[in-house]
Amino acid sequence: MSKPFLTAEWRNLLMANYQIEPSILQKYLPCRTELDSFNNVHFISLVGFLFKNTRLKGLSIPFHRHFEEVYLRFYVRYKDDGEWKGGVVFIKEIVPKCTISFIANIIYKEKYVSRRMKHSWEKNGNNLGIAYYWKVGSDWNYIKAVADLKTVSVKKDSEEEFITEHYWGYTFISNDCTGAYEVIHPKWNIHAVKSYEI
């Protein structure tokens, strides 16, 4: 088995999910993918998290091991040998390192940009505060939330399972070609959100 191109820990994912009119997403669909939905509802998600212990082909790159990422994604499926594989398509991905943007755009044909970024994590009693920030011009944009410190398992066949359980990324290569890569991760537990601000 070949060594994964990239390995990392994804810490404290913060996801804001919105219902969206499917016609808005059509222009972003890679070849031979189709929009996926949960109970006939289409979603788009704004996601912030921290990459930790990042390695490329097993190598740790100095000053590129821990960094924030914020992205906007939606949900698709792709038929491979008669089997549907659910996945995601990224509209925009933001990281603080230019080298990461360059490699991801070349290798994965993604849509990365680099911005100044920061994050904060705070535990206060039974609460967990999570925030991710990215700077555009002179303004700090952000996604932040206060959630229950304890976690619960994702229920089978739930909206949360649909949002979190995707293991493929699809990218536009050309009108006749779609790039696909597998993302392997454990099932995540979730924190009940008490308040949020974006």
Image (cartoon, rainbow, N blue to C red):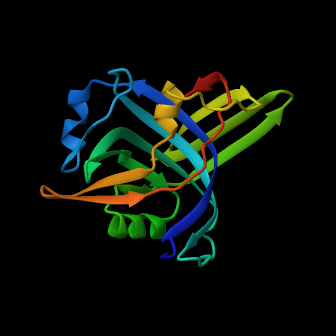
Residue 51 is situated, as x and y percent measured from the top left of the image, at 60, 57
Instruction: Please give left or right for residue 123 compared with residue 192 in the image.
Output: right
Q: Look at the picture and state if 105 lies above or below 168.
A: below
Judge by depth and name the residue closer to the eye, 28 or 116.
28
Q: Residue at x 22, y 49 (%)?
A: 30
Judge by depth and name the residue closer to the eye, 88 or 13.
88
Q: Look at the picture and state if 194 lies above or below 70.
A: above
Judge by depth and name the residue closer to the eye, 20 or 87.
87
Residue lying at the far left in this picture: please name it. 175
- Residue 112: quarter of image: bottom left
Instruction: Please give left or right for residue 71 compared with residue 11 in the image.
Output: left
Q: Residue at x 51, y 75 (%)?
A: 3
Q: Residue at x 20, y 37 (%)?
A: 26
Q: Residue at x 33, y 58 (%)?
A: 180
- Residue 39: quarter of image: top left
Residue 37 is situated, as x and y percent measured from the top left of the image, at 34, 29
Tell me how many marks there are: 0
